[in-house]
Image (tube, rainbow, N blue to C red):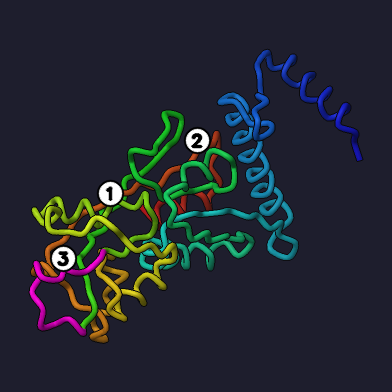
Amino acid sequence: HLTQTAVTQRIRTLETQLKTTLFIRTRRGMQLTQQGEALLHYCQAAKLLEGEALASIQGAATQTEVALSITAPSSMMRSRIMPGCLPVMKKFPHLLLHFDVNDTEVGHQDLRSGKADLAVIREQDLALEMQYKKLQPEQYVLVCSAQWKSRRLKNIISHERIIDFNATDQITLEYLKAYDLFSLAQRGRYYMNQTENLTDLVISGVGYSVLAKEFAKPYIQSKQLMVLNKSQTYDVFHVLAWFDRPEPPGYFSAILDAIA
């Protein structure tokens, strides 16, 4: 129930008190500066700490619910994040975890904007002000439809197309380069921006791709997928990232330990 002028005035007053600039105007609208992002994360941490304190004071009968968002690629979410968080959810029943499956490699942006409290990201996307823990690497395998079991590796790569998540997805290309197979591959690729559906395309014989070994395991065991290149793997490294909190609540530390 405030006018735009009143909101603008409050922002200016806050900037004057803090002696900094919190927003900049762009063609896409107002955006936070680095100082603005820092203040946003401080406020979010303070809100979570308040919820933790109230939950402790008020007792189990009237616990204050606290929400926490985790964003991660689908393969990591299924194989590590969710299984790791289950014991934490039982230990802290007032904690409402939001699991955000995101395969677009923008977890660092969601973390900076405050959409996520924790993010599984590539190490090269870390910002200096982020805290992080290294995760065990994901092992990727080259896979195709089990229908192609009689075909040789080089024949498949030469005559079939790669299926990737989107144009920025480089893992299949990195895999082929690591094993001196890239020169054989066709340059045009198919795209499917949902991992389960991408897998379905591979199973149906549309093309080939790489999948995280843990994710692909049930499809391989059910003989829907076949692993190529003598099951050799390519390691992809991720980190669990977050912004520092003055006094991390117990559930926050428990999640870090469970995942990392």
Foreground: 193 or 86?
193
**Residue picked out by circle 1:** 237
Whether the magenta-drawn stretch holds residue 153 is answered as yes
Residue 194 locus on image (x, y percent): 44, 66
Cα separation between marks 2 and 1: 22 Å
Question: In percent of the image, x 57 and y 60: which residue is there?
Answer: 97
Q: Quadrant of residue 35?
A: top right
- Horizontal arrangement in the rendering, residue 236 relative to residue 49 (left or right): left
Q: Quadrant of the N terminus?
A: top right
Residue 165 against residue 31 in the figure, above or below? below
Q: Say whether marks 2 and 1 touch (CB < 8 Å).
A: no
Amino acid type indicated by mark 1: Phe
Cα separation between marks 2 and 3: 45 Å
**Residue picked out by circle 3:** 157
Question: In percent of the image, x 36 and y 44: which residue is there?
Answer: 133
Q: Residues within 10 Å of mark 1 (few under 14, many from 20)?
A: some
The magenta segment is 147-161
**Residue picked out by circle 2:** 244
Mark closest to the chain's N terminus, 3 or 1: 3
Q: Nearer the viewer, mark 2 or mark 3?
A: 3
Amino acid type indicated by mark 3: Ile
Residue 252 against residue 215 in the figure, above or below? above
Question: In percent of the image, x 65 and y 24: which residue is there?
Answer: 24
Mark closest to the chain's N terminus, 2 or 3: 3
Q: Say whether marks 2 and 3 touch (CB < 8 Å).
A: no
Amino acid type indicated by mark 2: Asp
Secondary structure at badge 3 equals helix
Residue 59 locus on image (x, y percent): 70, 59
